Amino acid sequence: MARQSLVLVFLILAWYGSSIVCTNSTKYVMQSEDLGRPSGIELTICQMFVSSLCGVLVITIQRLFSSNKGTVYFAPSSAYHLFFPLAVVFTLGFVTLNFSLGLMSGSLTSTLRATEPFISLLLNLILFGQNPAKELKLNMSIIVIVLGASLASYGNRDFTWVGFGSVMFANFFFCFRTIIYKKLKSSYPLSDTTLFFNICWCSFLLNIVYMVLFERNNIEEWLLKLALSSSDAKFYVLVNGVSFYMYLQLSFTVLSNVSAITHSVLNSFRRPAVILFSILQFGNNLSRINGIGVMMACIGVSVYSILKRSTPSKEKIT
């Protein structure tokens, strides 16, 4: 029992650590002059490529050394009518998120990402006509999140409307990612490593097809800059891809070892950790109002997550 607890603590710390490294290295790569300040889609291609390789490696290790020899690389062909739409919203979510990290600080971007429940509420209101008054406590926590994000942005020198819009688009796409992922998970009994590997390679394939058809010159120029860049720049791109895979895969792994409510609480504490280390690395200046806003947004997300997991809901998009 003590050994299992230690393993769980290690997994949680690795999840937090990889999330911090991914966010900060994304910020570094997106603003790297050595790499020519890549676009959101160019960095996303690298993240999906490296994550696909990591997925192959992890599944191979599981098949060789794990007691569960049934882990497979690819999903049944009938599942790809869900995998490819999931890959589309997954890709668009991270393209817009990466783009926003290139425009604003990691701490502000992470705080604005906390408004995803608000986007979910709007989508439910518009698409399904859900009455917000039916879940008053839940929606009050969303108000706290929105107020916190507003205060965190107020007078912040890193704030830009383009970056803000990009984060909101990311939240929009991630809401639909949740819907498709839940349907896929309930329809096909695949391991989390198999699910995530297939999401990554499908996303990588879609990115490549788009770039070849519409932005061939840009991708060739980006690959040339990457090839001619310094070894430090290449190292950051590699670290970013590996940490991207680790933090998302470890989130699934931790979830499989704890209750849904515990995972929500842990995920809520992860955000302040990411914000804190972003401030420490990049020296972002926060006013007292901005700091209060960050805390309000994080607390609001924590309360929302606990309420969402502990009470039944008729909400269509979560």
Image: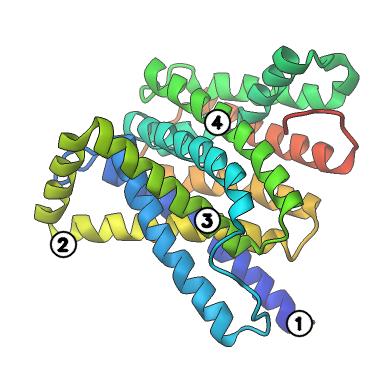
Amino acid type, residue under disc 4 in the picture: Phe
Amino acid type, residue under disc 1 in the picture: Ala
Q: Which callout, 4 or 1, points to the residue nearer the camera?
A: 4
Q: Which residue is mark 4?
A: 173
Rounded to the nearest whole Å, what is the CA distance between mark 4 and mark 3? 18 Å
Q: Which is more toward the observer, 217 or 228?
A: 217
Query: Percent from the top left, x then y, of residue 13?
Result: 58, 64
Rounded to the nearest whole Å, what is the CA distance between mark 2 and mark 1? 42 Å
Q: Would you say 281 lies left or right of 196 here?
A: left
First in residue order: circle 2 vs circle 1? 1
Q: Which is more toward the observer, 38 or 11?
A: 38
Determine whether label 2 and label 1 are within 8 Å by CB. Answer: no
First in residue order: circle 4 vs circle 2? 4
Rounded to the nearest whole Å, what is the CA distance between mark 3 and mark 1? 34 Å
Q: Secondary structure at mark 2?
A: helix
Q: Which residue is mark 2?
A: 231
Query: Percent from the top left, x then y, of residue 91?
Result: 45, 39
Q: State the residue at coordinates (77%, 36%).
A: 303
Amino acid type, residue under disc 2 in the picture: Ser
Query: Percent from the top left, x then y, of residue 167?
Result: 48, 27
Amino acid type, residue under disc 3 in the picture: Asn
Q: Secondary structure at mark 3?
A: helix
Q: Which residue is mark 1?
A: 2
**Residue 4 found in image quarter:** bottom right
Q: Which is more toward the observer, 288 or 169?
A: 169
Q: Which residue is mark 3?
A: 198
Rounded to the nearest whole Å, what is the CA distance between mark 4 and mark 1? 40 Å
**Residue 82's disc number:** none
Determine whether label 4 and label 2 are within 8 Å by CB. Answer: no
Specify few, some or many for label 3: CA neighbours under 10 Å numbering under 14, 14-19, or 20 or more: many
